[in-house]
Image (cartoon, rainbow, N blue to C red):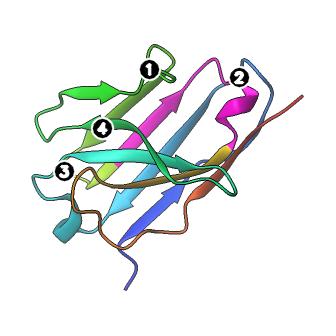
Amino acid sequence: QVQLVESGGGLVQPGGSLRLSCVASGSIFGFNDMAWYRQIPGEQREFIAGIAFGGTTYYVDSVKGRFTISRDNNKNMVYLQMNSLKPEDTAVYYCNKRYNAATWGQGTQVTVSS
């Protein structure tokens, strides 16, 4: 049973923008903090942005001011607006609960390259 589905990735030039979307099953979304993570091949998956049910957001320094996380509690959706993209943002992006992560989805590939 697929519970997390990410979409919206692609190839973009440095300085460009992408908007990622994630739909989660109700059992995952609930009242939980949701988050976006990313993973570069050969490295550990890292947390980059989180959002509480009420909308409070928090980010790691490397994406602060460039990425914006949001959620639609009626649709069980989480979004990540990514602006001013850099080559070092290239990774597979995943969404999940911020704490006690559920089974990971397939993620969506973001490639930033000229």
Q: Quadrant of residue 86?
A: top right
Pointer 3: residues within 10 angstroms few (<14), some, or many (20+)? few
Q: Could you tell me residue 51's position as x and y percent?
A: 25, 36
Element assignment for label 3:
loop
> Seen in the image, is 107 located left or right of residue 74?
right
Q: Residue furthest front?
A: 43
Pointer 4 residue = 50
Q: Which mark is residue 74?
A: 3
> Seen in the image, is 50 located left or right of residue 41?
left
Pointer 2 residue = 16
Q: Which mark is residue 75?
A: none
Name the front one of labels 4 and 1: 1
Q: Residue furthest right?
A: 114
Residue type for callout 3: Asn
| In-front residue for pair 40/104 | 40
> Seen in the image, is 40 located left or right of residue 113?
left
Q: Could you tell me residue 60's position as x and y percent?
A: 40, 27
Residue type for callout 4: Gly
Evaluate if marks 3 and 1 touch, with contact meaning CB atoms under 8 Å apart. no
Instruction: Determine the CA span between mark 3 and mark 4.
Output: 18 Å
Pointer 1 residue = 61
Residue type for callout 2: Gly
**Disc 4 or 2, which lies upstream in sequence?**
2
Residue segment shown in magenta: 78-90
Query: Which residue is rendered at x = 90% and y = 28% of the image?
Result: 114
Name the front one of labels 3 and 1: 1
Q: Residue furthest bottom?
A: 1
**Disc 3 or 4, which lies upstream in sequence?**
4
